[in-house]
Image (cartoon, rainbow, N blue to C red):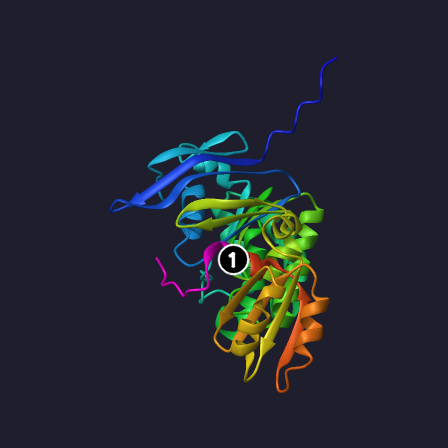
Amino acid sequence: MFGTLAPMPLFRVEHLTKRYGGNAVVDDLSLHIEAGECLGVIGPNGAGKTTTIRMCLGLVAPDSGMIEAFGLPIPQQVREAKNRIGVVTQLDSLDPDFDCTENLRVYGRYFGLPLATIDARIPKLLAFAALQSKAEAKPTELSGGMKRRLSLARALINDPDLLLLDEPTTGLDPQARHLMWDRLKQLLQQGKAILLTTHFMDEAERLCDRLLVLDNGRCIAEGTPRGLIAEHLESDVVEVYGDGAGAAAQELGHLAQRVEHSGETVFFYLREPAPLLQALAGYAGLRTLHRPANLEDLFLKLTGRQIRDDA
């Protein structure tokens, strides 16, 4: 009896490597994405996230490895593959001389779409981006959130099966970010696949089915958000602030599996919080926050707390 064959991923990368001056910016990276799935890529500055996206778009040639979209090799057949790919880059590339409608129309022509098809899609895309009232406004008249939503609408003009989103909500206020999340969830429900790079851990946890954690160009962890947290972290975190937090850490550190310091805050990572919380109640002037472990804790444990410059 024959088993059911697993569906072919829409997009896959195998053993991808890119070096600059002897430094491996992307180092033996493999990933795959299936229809209706959001794969998140997180990591500190210089981890190789944007370089990976650029190689996936055929903008940078890898030193070794394989990239394939819809069965088409990249960069060899990148033009054909791009007909089914939508892209939102870190920086807006909207044409400031065109209004919202014209930005969508001109971009659609790059794909060779009939003008009638483009014009039929534009009202729906403007509605999807909540920009119906801004159809004749130029990008210079839009807020940052509106520009990002217009960039997403533009990326959808060719009705792509795969979206490559490089930090699409950077610089947005909470309301604009939540609206973008809602729109991305709608796209996933339609069966579109998303490759998402982000620095927002709550964004990764809300949107991503799976995560890759990159550091120094290498994948150091992979799995579902909750699965990674369970695998690498204690279940609970107690944050302690205020005068005497350092002394409390020295005296009560034995009640936790790990203790970390960041500025004036002490983080107790543990599985049984009750004894620590009871002991902390005897320290006057301390403020405490008890919460479950999250992706930010995972990120900091795996990649460290030190600030890194862009690379």
Main SS, magenta region, reads: loop
Name the image quarter holding residue 9.
top right
- The picture places residue 279, in percent across and down from the top left corner, at 67, 75
Classify 10 Å Cα crowding around label 1: few (below 14), some (14-19), many (20 and above): few
- The picture places residue 45, in percent across and down from the top left corner, at 41, 59
Numbered range of the magenta stretch: 299-311
Secondary structure type for disc 1:
helix
Asked whether, in this view, residue 82 is left or right of residue 226, the answer is left
Residue at horizontal 24%, vertical 47%? Answer: 21
Q: Amino acid at mark 1?
A: Lys
Residue in front for this viewpoint, 79 or 14: 14
Q: Is residue 28 magenta?
A: no
Residue in front for this viewpoint, 120 or 77: 77
Name of the residue lying farthest toward the bottom: 285
Is residue 70 among the parts visible in the rendering? yes
In the rendered image of this protein, does residue 95 appear above or below residue 239? above
Name the image quarter holding residue 182.
bottom right
Residue in front for this viewpoint, 181 or 235: 235
- The picture places residue 293, in percent across and down from the top left corner, at 64, 60
- The picture places residue 96, in percent across and down from the top left corner, at 45, 67
Residue at horizontal 67%, vertical 81%? Answer: 282
Quarter of the image for the C terminus: give it: bottom left
Question: Which residue is under mark 1?
Answer: 301
Name the image quarter holding residue 7.
top right
Residue at horizontal 67%, vertical 56%? Answer: 124
Name of the residue lying farthest toward the right: 1
Name of the residue lying farthest toward the left: 21
Residue in front for this viewpoint, 212 or 290: 290
Quarter of the image for the N terminus: give it: top right
Residue at horizontal 56%, vertical 44%? Answer: 222
Q: How many marks?
A: 1
